[in-house]
Image (cartoon, helix red, strand yellow):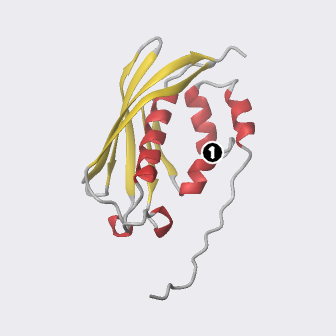
Amino acid sequence: MEFTKQRERVYSWENPFEGVELSKGLSGMEYLLAIKNGQAPASPLINTLDFSLGELEEGKVSFYFEPQEFHYNPNGSVHGGVITAILDSAMGCTLHSLLPKGTVYTTLELKVNFLKRVHANSGVLTATGKMIHLGNSTALVEASLTDESGKKYAYAVSTCMLLRNDK
C-alpha cells in the first residue's frame, strides 16, 4: 500500500504569559471578554486545535470547531482527547465567567461520555458549558457537544477547586 502525500498545517499563537499577567487584574468575565475582543491572547491550545470562542455570558460559554483530518485518531474519527479538550474548554470558561478578580480554579475531576462518532462530515460542532453549582471552594460544571441540528455527540461533567490567587 502506498501512502498519499503528507499533509501540512501551519498556525501561530501569541505569548500565553501576557494573558496570564493581564488576567490577574480582571474578573473572569472581563478577561474572557478581553480574549474575545482581541485584547488578550487566547490559549495556545485553542489555536492548536482550531477551536473558536462562541457565546459568552455569565455562567454559559460555548466553543465551536469543525472536525478536520488533523483531529483524527488511527480509527478514522476525531480523537477523544480533542472532544474532551473542547468540552473542558467550555466548562472551564463557563466557571471562569463567574469568578471574581483574584480567584482561579483547577480541575479536580473530569468525566466524559462519548455518545456518537465525530468525523469530518459531522459539520460544525458546538461545546456549550453550563454551571451546575458554584460554591465557596468547589464548582460543578457540565458541557454538551452538539451539531447544528441539536444532535448530541458527547457530554461531560467537571468538578473544579477554587483557589485565591493572592500573589
Front one among 140 and 111:
111
- The residue located at (58%, 49%) in the rendering is 45
Q: Classify residue 109 by image quadrant.
A: top left
Give residue 155's position: percent from left, percent from top.
31, 42
Provide the secondary structure element on which disc 1 rests: loop
Quarter holding residue 163: top right
Q: Residue furthest bottom?
A: 2
45 in relation to 132, above or below:
below
Q: Nearer the viewer, residue 88 or 148?
A: 88
Quadrant assignment for the N terminus: bottom left
Percent position (x, y) of residue 62? Answer: 43, 43
Query: Which of 161 and 18 lies nearest the eye of the viewer?
Result: 161
Few, some or many residues within 10 Å of mark 1 (<14, 14–19, 20+): many
Disc 1 designates what residue?
A: 42
Which quarter of the rendering shows the C terminus?
top right
Q: Residue at x 26, y 57 (%)?
A: 149
Residue under the image location 48 percent in, 41 percent down: 89
Task: Give the answer, above or below, for where 91 lies relative to 26.
Answer: below
Compared to 81, does 4 lie above or below? below
Q: Residue at x 31, y 57 (%)?
A: 148
Q: Is residue 142 visible?
A: yes
Q: Quadrant of residue 11?
A: bottom right
* x then y, percent, for residue 43: 62, 44
Q: For the residue marked with disc 1, what is the amino acid?
A: Ala
From the viewer's perspective, is 111 left or right of 103?
left
Q: Is there any visible trace of residue 97 in the rendered image?
A: no
Please identify the residue farthest to the front as the structure is shown: 1
* Residue 132 point in image, percent of width and height: 33, 25
Count the labels in the image.
Answer: 1
**Residue 7 appears left or right of 150:** right
